[in-house]
Image (tube, grey):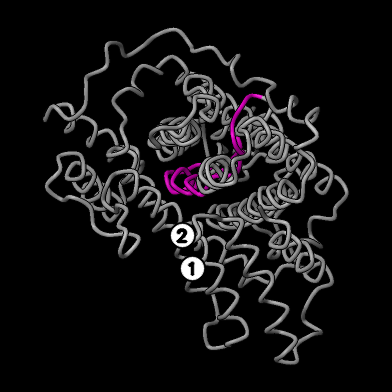
Amino acid sequence: MKNYFQFEQLGTNYRREIIGGVTTFLSMAYILVVNPLMLSLADVPDLPDEMRMNMGAVFVATAVAAAIGSLLMGLIAKYPIALAPGMGLNAFFAFTVVLTMGVPWQHALGGVFISGVIFVILTLSGFREKIINAIPAELKYAVSAGIGLFITFVGAQNAGIIVNDDATLVVLGDIHDGNVLLAVFGIIITVILMTRGVNGGIFIGMVITAIAGMLLGLIDRPEKIVDSIPSIAPTFGAAFGAFSDSSFFTTQMLVVVLTFLFVDFFDTAGTLVGVANQAGLMKDNKLPRAGKALFADAVATVSGAVLGTSTTTSYIESSAGVAAGARTGFASIVTAVLFLLSLFFFPVLSVVTSAVTAPALIIVGVLMVASLGKIDWTKFEIAVPAFLTILAMPLTYSIATGIAIGFIFYPITMIVKGRTKEIHPIMYGLFVVFVLYFIFLK
């Protein structure tokens, strides 16, 4: 085992790897709570039951998909990087595809499955580098920042911090309401923990907020802590049912699939480079075993879609485990085991309300908008598509619309500026796809 993971060469040991794996799990364990609530649209009232995914099944799918992805990353790529259903992509799945577009969640899972298969093919063919190089870095950063703002808006809305207003569209909610105050308390606690650099600060913040809610009578106490594992039957294999429905094959679903693929592709690439660089695993400014890492990510997405969850991707929270000493894939295996053990703690989800999850969503948004600093705002031809991408996501309540608008304006501003040679042919193809998206958008 030591030789396989090169403990001696990387200056690590079992203790450091185990501590790193546990730290990574604690840093991303919030997804076990947030993902089922988000995909089931638990905070959206008055919806038909057929629009909601089964919360217990999604919980199991989330944990198992995270375990599979982390295990593959550890064994195949040997990186201390854990995977789970990604924040942002789950919001796109639930609030844009299902809630706004009216796409059945089974079809959305089918879209995730297809994007995962395409990702596998691109990884095996080596075409992934061409796609990465085709899309300008500024738009990649803009997409990340836009998703961060969108997630923050969703969190604030679910907690009642931001509410609807007929005159101004949105306005500050009732700050005297107990649940709103609990969410604000959670934000303050989580900010303090994150500022102090506490490992697992987001997860610990959720725990403290939930306990405070129970003590104040705002949240009902769980009847059990440990119980049998919920059934995954309601979601398992549901993605395949979409392929027999002719309404699945539309331009709208094409955009959905491309969005799943695009965000996962570049989010994964950025996470891999960032965490590997932090761990000192980069060689000559290149990422060893990058193909294997991307393959593990792609297979995890396919597995997650079959199980019944949104896109599974590499987590930047893995950097917390690296900071705690993790250097090899053994840490990812530890994280995978912990995700499997978490399957027995489903009853605890009953204490997790929107007031508890809002701080996690908002803080993750803060982390994602850090990419704003990497955009060259002094160049107007770059600033316009980047700004419109970022702004459109929360204002249209759609990640896909934000990407579409940015990818349409980028070739226009670059051509007018006389920088046509810098536009990759793939970008022209995407321009046409997104124009058609708006033409045929219902």
Report the residue at 32% width, 22% height from top: 350
- Identify the disc placed on residue 112: none
Q: Secondary structure at mark 2?
A: helix
Contact flag, marks 1 and 2 (Cβ < 8 Å): yes
Q: Residue at x 63, y 28 (%)?
A: 68
Outermost residue toward the top in this view: 228
In magenta, the rendered stretch is: 307-329
Give the left or right position of residue 321, taking residue 279 as reference: left
Residue at 27% across, 39% down:
355
Image position of 292 (left or right of 145): right
Which of the pair 97/24 is nearer the observer? Answer: 97
Residue 163 point in image, percent of width and height: 29, 52
Q: Is residue 127 above or below residue 135?
A: above
> Can you identify the residue that label 2 sits on?
394
Quarter of the image with the N terminus in it? top right
- How packed mark 1 is, by other alpha carbons closer than 10 Å (few <14, some 14-19, many 20 or more), is many
Q: Which residue is mark 1?
A: 391
Magenta highlight on residue 322: yes
**Amino acid type at image mark 2:** Pro
Residue 180 image position (x, y, % from top left): 21, 44
Q: Residue at x 60, y 33 (%)?
A: 70
Callout 2: 10 Å neighbours few (<14), some, many (20+)? Answer: many
